[in-house]
Amino acid sequence: MVGEWWSILILRDCLRGLSRFDQFQKNLAISPNMLARRLQTLIDAGLLERRQYREHPPRYEYILTDRGRDFHIVIAAMYDWGNRNLPYTGAGQSGVQHVTAQEYLEAKNKET
């Protein structure tokens, strides 16, 4: 269901407020075919719901279900693990910035 990296990144972006195909593609630099397959997998797993927002031409957005919103716990756990186990070397350098998962998600929502 979400055992591969693209699905986790798509769910992370949904939690940050992204919902449209072109937003995911731009943010993740993922091929359209791969993105379409991953979105369908997440729909089939009950984590996303596809809703039409324009008729001509047909355009869809991908909305988290209750089950998908519950995935924030997994993202937060991964982020917290990174904070505890990966070195932070300062601004502008590689490493993980040490903030809480909630602070991270709130900051990312403000960016979008």
Image (spheres, rainbow, N blue to C red):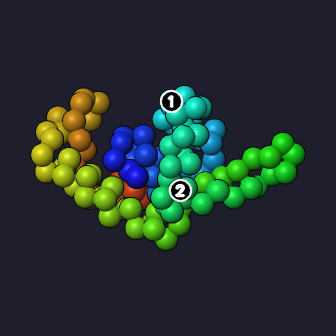
Mark drawn on residue 77: none
Q: Is residue 25 left or right of residue 15?
A: right
Residue that numbered label 1 is attached to: 29
Q: Residue at x 50, y 53 (%)?
A: 42
Residue that numbered label 2 is attached to: 44
Task: Decide: is 39 above or below 47.
Answer: above
Q: Secondary structure at mark 2?
A: helix
Task: Decide: is 76 above or below 30.
Answer: below
Q: Residue at x 80, y 46 (%)?
A: 58
Residue 80 percent across, percent down from the top left: 22, 55
Q: Earlier in the sequence, mark 2 or mark 1?
A: 1
Residue 50 percent across, percent down from the top left: 64, 56
Q: Residue at x 42, y 40 (%)?
A: 6
The residue lying toward the viewer, choosing from 43 and 81, is: 43
Residue 10 seen in the figure = yes
The residue lying toward the viewer, choosing from 82 and 60, is: 60
- Tag 1: residue type? Ala
Q: Is residue 72 left or right of residue 66?
A: left
Residue 59 percent across, percent down from the top left: 75, 47
- Tag 2: residue type? Asp
Q: Is residue 57 left or right of residue 109?
A: right
Task: Decide: is 68 above or below 16.
Answer: below
Q: Secondary structure at mark 1?
A: loop
The residue lying toward the viewer, choosing from 33 and 84, is: 33
Instruction: Say whether marks 2 and 1 touch (CB < 8 Å).
Output: no
Residue found at the far right of this picture: 56
Label 1 neighbour load within 10 Å: few <14, some 14-19, many 20+: few
Residue 36 percent across, percent down from the top left: 58, 40
Q: Residue at x 25, y 52 (%)?
A: 78
Label 2 neighbour load within 10 Å: few <14, some 14-19, many 20+: few
